[in-house]
Image: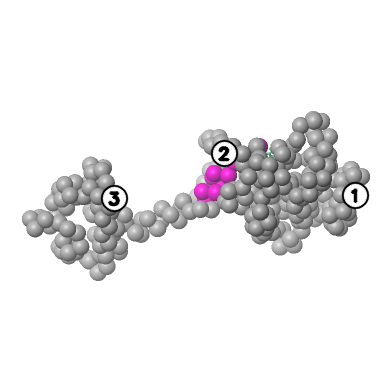
C-alpha cells in the first residue's frame, strides 16, 4: 500500500485544492481538476493507495463525499481525514472499549496471575471515587491457597451449595467498608472500587467476576476472625469480592442492552 499525506492547510478554494492534490498524488497529466475527475482517477488508479488528508477545513465536505464514493467503488483504496479520525478514536478509545467488552468470567486457568498484574488491578481500585474523598474501602487480595479454600467454603455455606462460588479463580479480592450506619457511602464506595478493578482486570487480559455474599460471610465469628488476621480495623462490613485470574474460555459477547436503558433530557 502506498501512503500519501496531503496537507491542505491554507487551502481555501477548489482550485487550490486540486493543485494540492495534483502535487501530492500520482495523478495523470490529463487530471481535470474538478471533483468528478477526482472520482474518476481515484476509482481508476486508487487500488493500493492510502491517502491521509490533513487540515481539510473549508474544502473538506465535497472532498469527503467524493472520496467516500470512490472508496465504495474501489477495493484497496483507503482515505482518512485526520480530524475525523481523531474524533472517531476519541469516541471509541481503549477505556470505552474495555467498559463495553468486559464480561464476567466463570472458568479460570489454575496458574496464578503475576504480582505486577495484581498490583495494576488493586491500584485501579484505589483510584475509584469515594464519598467525600474519604477512601473508606479496604481491599484484601487473597492468594494463599488455604485462605482461598476457606473463603470458598464460607461463601458456599452462605449460598447453600457445595460448588466453588469463586469458580476456581486463584486470586480472590475482597472489599470491605465501614458499616452503613456510620458512613452511608460504604456500599457505593466499595462497589465503585470493585467496578474499577473488574474493568482494569479486563484491560490487561485478566478475567474477573463479582462474587457476592461477603456481607454475610464476614458477619460470622469465622469471618471476623479472618478480618483480624488480615489486619483490618474492627467493625467493617463485607461489600463484595471479585474472582480474578486468567480466563480459560473466550469471553461471551455482551447481552443486548435493554432499549430504554437511558434517556437524555435536554
Ligand atoms: C452486585 C453483583 C453481584 C453479583 N454476584 C455474582 C455472584 O455471586 N456470582 C456470579 O457468578 N456472578 C455474580 N455477579 C455477576 C453478574 O451475574 C454479571 O455481572 C451479569 O450477569 C452481567 O454479565 P457481565 O458481567 O458478563 O456483563 C454479580 C454482579 C453484581 C453487580
Counting every numbered tag in the picture gives 3
Task: Assign a secondary structure to mark 2.
Answer: loop
Label 1 neighbourhood size at 10 Å, few (<14), some (14-19), many (20+)? Answer: few
Q: Is 105 within the magenta?
A: yes
Q: Which residues are magenta?
A: 96-106
- In the figure, 106 relative to 206: above or below? above
**Residue that appears at 53% across and 53% down:** 95
Question: Of the residues under marks 3 and 2, which one precedes in the sequence?
Answer: 3
From the Cβ of disc 2, is ligand 1 less than 8 Å away?
A: yes
Question: Of the residues under marks 1 and 3, which one precedes in the sequence?
Answer: 3
Residue identifier under label 2: 251
Q: CA distance from mark 3 to mark 2?
A: 32 Å
Question: Of the residues under marks 2 and 1, which one precedes in the sequence?
Answer: 1
Check if mark 2's residue and mark 1's residue have beta carbons within 8 Å: no
Q: CA distance from mark 1 to mark 3?
A: 64 Å
**Residue that appears at 75% across and 54% down:** 139
**Residue that appears at 65% across and 41% down:** 109
Extreme residue toward the front, this view: 111
**Front-most of 64 and 72?**
72
Residue identifier under label 3: 78
Q: How is the image coloured?
A: one colour
Q: Is 49 within the magenta?
A: no
On screen, residue 207 versus residue 6, left or right, reads right
On screen, residue 95 versus residue 165, left or right, reads left
On screen, residue 111 versus residue 103, left or right, reads right
Amino acid at each position: 500500500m502506498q501512503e500519501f499525506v496531503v496537507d491542505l492547510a491554507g487551502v481555501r478554494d477548489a482550485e487550490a485544492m486540486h493543485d494540492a492534490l495534483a502535487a501530492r498524488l500520482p495523478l495523470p497529466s490529463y487530471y481535470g481538476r474538478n471533483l468528478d475527475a477526482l472520482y474518476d482517477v481515484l476509482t481508476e488508479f486508487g487500488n493500493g493507495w492510502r491517502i491521509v488528508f490533513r487540515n481539510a477545513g473549508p474544502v473538506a465536505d465535497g472532498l469527503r463525499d467524493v472520496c467516500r464514493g470512490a472508496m465504495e467503488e474501489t477495493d484497496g483504496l483507503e482515505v482518512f481525514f485526520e480530524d475525523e479520525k481523531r474524533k472517531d478514536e476519541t469516541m471509541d478509545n481503549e477505556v470505552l472499549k474495555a467498559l463495553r467488552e468486559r464480561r464476567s468470567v466463570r472458568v479460570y486457568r489454575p496458574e496464578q496471575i503475576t504480582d505486577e498484574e495484581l498490583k495494576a488491578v488493586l491500584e485501579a481500585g484505589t483510584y475509584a471515587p469515594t464519598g467525600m474523598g474519604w477512601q473508606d474501602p479496604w481491599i484484601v487480595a487473597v492468594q494463599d491457597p488455604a485462605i482461598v479454600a476457606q473463603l470458598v467454603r464460607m461463601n458456599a455455606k452462605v449460598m447453600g451449595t457445595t460448588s466453588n462460588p469463586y469458580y476456581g479463580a486463584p486470586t480472590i479480592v475482597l472489599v470491605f467498608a465501614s458499616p452503613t450506619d456510620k458512613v452511608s457511602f460504604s456500599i457505593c464506595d466499595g462497589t465503585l472500587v470493585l467496578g474499577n478493578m473488574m474493568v482494569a482486570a479486563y484491560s490487561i487480559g485478566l478475567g474477573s467476576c463479582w462474587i457476592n455474599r461477603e456481607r454475610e460471610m464476614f458477619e460470622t465469628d469465622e469471618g471476623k476472625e479472618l478480618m483480624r488476621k488480615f489486619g483490618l480495623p474492627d467493625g467493617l462490613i463485607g461489600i463484595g469480592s471479585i474472582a480474578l485470574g486468567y480466563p480459560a474460555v473466550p469471553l461471551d459477547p455482551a447481552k443486548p442492552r435493554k432499549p430504554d436503558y437511558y434517556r437524555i433530557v435536554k
